[in-house]
Amino acid sequence: MEVARYWRTTGQRYQLVGEVCPNCGNRIFPPRDVCPVCEKEARTPFTFSGKGEVYSYSTIHVAPEGFEKFAPYTVALVRLAEGPLVTAQLTDVDEDEIRIGMPVEMVTRVLREDGERGMLVYGYKFRPARPVSADAPKAAAAPARVTEPATNMSELSLVPQPTA
């Protein structure tokens, strides 16, 4: 991958940034500038959640050039929660654990080394979605209270101050 293209597509590879059509609401990934549904201009950026489920998959045993050291690996079609199908490698899962409909989440990982200098090319892969632990702290129901800024140095002290 040439350096210019690498930097131009960073949003797509690290954050799943696509587009949403302002005319019909279709969510598009990767970005195409023209909606495949209504064929109108679609240039409104949209960041996908990275959550989805396995739609289909295949395990690669004989890898193409540049990916030999990763074989065997599994490539899947992932249906994102927002609708589009994305092709990506599955990671952090054994082949016998993969199921159609399995919930997955996007992670950023090394895709390959590019060239003799070994430039590491990162991108998105999907792993099984991690369940939220019952011990995990609950999200705040309301935003934290913002206090007024300190007006004198005694208010900045970490040591409790006597009250009047």
Image: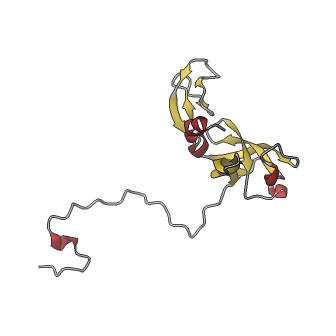
Percent coordinates x, y for residue 109 in the rendering: 65, 53
Image quarter of the C terminus = bottom left
The residue sitting at 16% across, 73% down in the picture is 154
* Residue farthest along the right direction in this orientation: 62
The residue sitting at 42% across, 58% down in the picture is 141
Residue 100 in view: no
The residue sitting at 57% across, 18% down in the picture is 40
Percent coordinates x, y for residue 42 in the rendering: 54, 24
Image quarter of the N terminus = top right
- Quarter occupied by residue 27: top right
The residue sitting at 51% across, 33% down in the picture is 45
State the residue in front, 138 or 150: 150
Instruction: Answer above or below: position of 43 versus 159.
Output: above
Does residue 99 appear to the left or right of 51 in the view shown? right
Residue 60 in view: yes
Q: How is the image coloured?
A: secondary structure
Instruction: Answer above or below: position of 56 versus 24.
Output: below
**Badge count:** 0
Percent coordinates x, y for residue 129 in the rendering: 67, 55
* Residue farthest along the left direction in this orientation: 164
* Residue farthest along the front direction in this orientation: 116
Instruction: Answer above or below: position of 159 versus 146.
Output: below
State the residue in front, 135 or 121: 121
- Quarter occupied by residue 151: bottom left
Does residue 98 appear to the left or right of 158 in the view shown? right
Percent coordinates x, y for residue 133 in the rendering: 60, 66
